[in-house]
Amino acid sequence: MFTALTDTVQVAPQITVDQVAAAKAQGVTMIINNRPDGEDPAAPQGDAIAAAAAAAGIDYVAIPITHAGFSAPQVDAMITALAKAQGDGGKVLAYCRSGTRSTLLWSLAQAKQGESPAGLTQVAANAGYDLAPIRPMLDALAGKTE
């Protein structure tokens, strides 16, 4: 149901209100919504997931990523959210339409904190995601030319 990137970070396609309980059962303490409201009017919108998360005692953060791409404030917001969850000793579930934008944003946040773009690319590939479209951004954020 959810795809692990690390021991503490999972990604997923659009989740439902019912899946919030499944996330809680797996130790998720923060849900990060990377899907803009209205992208698919038939999908659960952020307020519904936020309410379910609150009812389950799970933190909820919205960092919507449109198809226009990623910005520095979004990367910084992801770093902040991940740091809070890590500080609380919890697990994160980030979701979007397919899990791709969540994986890309996670990798950009990691690169900005000095993680190896090559290593991040391998982690993403192992989870079924391709970082090639943002590899130059990863390299720039990490300050590397691998």
Image (cartoon, rainbow, N blue to C red):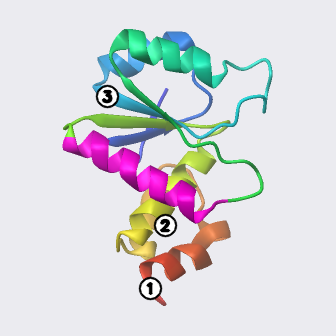
Most prominent secondary structure in the magenta stretch? Answer: helix
In this picture, residue 102 sits left or right of residue 122: right
Q: Residue at x 35, y 47 (%)?
A: 82
- Residue identifier under label 1: 143
- Residue identifier under label 2: 121
Task: Label 1: state its secondary structure.
Answer: loop
Q: Residue at x 66, y 47 (%)?
A: 65
Mark nearer the viewer, 2 or 1: 1
Q: Is residue 102 visible?
A: yes
Foreground residue among 4 and 95: 95
Q: Residue at x 48, y 49 (%)?
A: 127
* First to last magenta residue range: 70-87
Q: Amino acid at mark 2?
A: Thr
Which image quadrant is residue 115 in?
A: bottom left
Foreground residue among 132 and 104: 104
- Residue identifier under label 3: 29
Q: Is residue 16 visible?
A: no
Foreground residue among 18 and 39: 39
Q: Is residue 84 above or below residue 37?
A: below
Disc 2, disc 1: CB below 8 Å? no
Is the residue marked by circle 2 packed among few (<14), some (14-19), or many (20+) residues within 10 Å? Answer: many
In percent of width and height, residue 108 lies at 50, 64
In percent of width and height, residue 76 lies at 46, 58
Q: Tag 1 or tag 2, which sits nearer the N-term?
A: 2
Is the residue marked by circle 1 packed among few (<14), some (14-19), or many (20+) residues within 10 Å? Answer: some
Q: Amino acid at mark 1?
A: Gly
Whole-number angstrom distance, CA of label 2 to CA of label 1: 15 Å
